[in-house]
Image: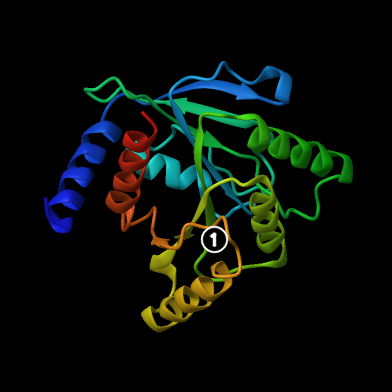
Amino acid sequence: MTDATDNAELMETGRKMFAGDWQFIWASPSIETLPPMKGVEVAFAGRSNVGKSSLINALTGRSALARTSHTPGRTQELIFFEGPSLPDGAQLRLVDMPGYGYASAPKAKIASWTSLIHKYLQGRANLARVYVLIDSRHGFKDADIDVLTTFDKSAVSYQVVLTKSDQVKSSELERTLHETAATLRKHPAAFPDILVTSSRTGAGMAELRAAMVRLLRERT
């Protein structure tokens, strides 16, 4: 099978999987309240207001599956969503992680979120990958670099997803892509391919769905 044919098949499988019935299944404010491990999980991390909830809604074609807010730091738990199984029985879960880098949140709250995220990353055997969302308009911030270093130390596979690509000029997006790739070369746990998306236009969603199908097949 050629790469083009393989990619087309992955995209079609991803389209069908995400067109199915996705549901909120669990919210965990602490490591003790995590749901039992089942299937394969992929998590979404990013600064507050980077567009995690909007991305999950765009992926699943549902306008309100994940709660969106203009108030940074609103998501304070690990939020789990589950969709239909693939024909071979493989099951995928999406995990919306608390946003990081919100300086106005109380320090105790930030410490609590940070501890929850670290423990989840280290103890979740069925976690296949973390998608780190970066705003195309701003690129990496210090808080993002800190998180990448944490993932490196935890030996967690992660991949960068640029969001809000429709809100920047193509020349600026190209520069951000180049700078992002250069930064990722310094981080050993980073998956080298960068995904470029827009929740508003749907750009990059087919490629992201295909990447998840590939992960699902590798882990099951």
Quarter of the image where the C terminus is located? top left
User: Mark 1 Cα within 10 Å, few/some/many (few <14, many 20+)?
Assistant: many
Residue lying farthest to the top in this orientation: 36
Q: Position of residue 19 (x, y in %)?
A: 25, 33
Q: Amino acid at mark 1?
A: Ile
For the residue pair 68 and 53, the one nearer the viewer reads as 53
Q: How many marks?
A: 1
Q: Position of residue 114 (x, y in %)?
A: 76, 42
Q: Tell me: 196 left or right of 35.
A: left
> Residue at the location (17% across, 49% down)?
6
> Residue at the location (69% across, 35% down)?
76
Q: Tell me: 91 left or right of 179.
A: left
Q: Is residue 93 above or below residue 212?
A: above
For the residue pair 174 and 36, the one nearer the viewer reads as 36
Q: Position of residue 87 (x, y in %)?
A: 21, 22
Question: Under tag 1, what secondary structure?
Answer: strand
Identify the image quadrant of residue 13: top left
Identify the image quadrant of residue 174: bottom left
Q: Position of residue 154 (x, y in %)?
A: 67, 45
> Residue at the location (54% across, 70% down)?
185
The residue where tag 1 is placed is 134
